[in-house]
Image (cartoon, rainbow, N blue to C red):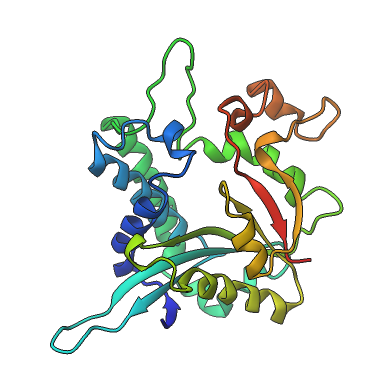
Amino acid sequence: MPLRLATFSDLGRISEIAAASFYDEELNDHIFPFRKQYPGDYVSVWHQKVVKSWSSFHKVWVVSYEEASAGKSGAVITGVAEWGREGKGADRLWGIVRWWDPRRLLAPFVSFFYTVHRFLFRNRSIAPSTPSNPNPLNKWNFGDRVEPYMNLFLTHPPYRLNRWELLTLAVDPAYQRRGIGQKLVAWGLDKAKAEGVPAVVIGAKDTEPFYHRCGFVHLVGNVSTAEIEDNDDCVKAKRIDKTNPLKAAGIVGGSVMWTE
């Protein structure tokens, strides 16, 4: 199936594919324990994530699609990959067009809008705060709480600050096992190779063999079992989360794999 860059009109379909592809992923049992009861709220969270990420200038969304059959109009999006460019060179990802892209002005408003929306309309698919768990993991606090543990394998020596990073890979369940995921991965790996920088992915549970076949051949650790030492630069995060929130939740996935 051919690939192309995503457009704004694709974001709804992308959100649906991501929600369906990750539906049974182990982390969803903790982040979206009520996704079955409130499927619309569940997809809404993914839509917010996708729209906000699409506004970022160091990220690229790529979709695979299937041409419409005879007698039908339009193409069907079958899979999606979110690639991020970090470090030196990230500011040149979109070239000079970046400075004239309307997303540059819209991004702060998108973030503010969704913040207000979450305050006014509680999402019923996520885990609520309880006395025993006042700050449950969700899509909005995930980065702040887990990123320090990710950075142990991403930004600390000997790892690379300049890199391509596969942030999301999702294929519509109806189109899986057709090689679509490998093509979406290869898109980013070709970009990394052309620039002479490595690529990295943090895989979900049981995805290590797939990513190894794609070219992520160096497994360097697991985010869900990482801990921050008192003398580490990320000690501030440890004061917020006394232990790795993924480890506390019993998450197994989180393998960090590099191409070199």
Quadrant of res 139: top left
- Relative vertical location of residue 78 with respect to residue 49 in this rendering, above or below: below
Left or right of residue 18: residue 209: right
Horizontal and vertical percent for residue 11?
33, 62
Left or right of residue 218: residue 59: left
Quadrant placement of the C terminus:
bottom right
**Whether residue 224 can be seen here:** yes
Quadrant placement of the N terminus:
bottom left
Left or right of residue 98: residue 37: left
Q: Residue at x 86, y 28 (%)?
A: 231
- Relative vertical location of residue 95 with respect to residue 78 in this rendering, above or below: below
Q: Residue at x 47, y 63 (%)?
A: 104
Q: Name the residue nearer the viewer: 231 or 250.
A: 250
Q: Residue at x 65, y 68 (%)?
A: 213
Q: Name the residue nearer the viewer: 136 or 64.
A: 64
User: In this view, which residue lies farthest toward the bottom?
Assistant: 70
Quadrant of res 242: top right
Q: Name the residue nearer the viewer: 233 or 33.
A: 33
- Relative vertical location of residue 88 with respect to residue 220 in this rendering, above or below: below
- Relative vertical location of residue 172 with respect to residue 33 in this rendering, above or below: below
**Whether residue 55 can be seen here:** no
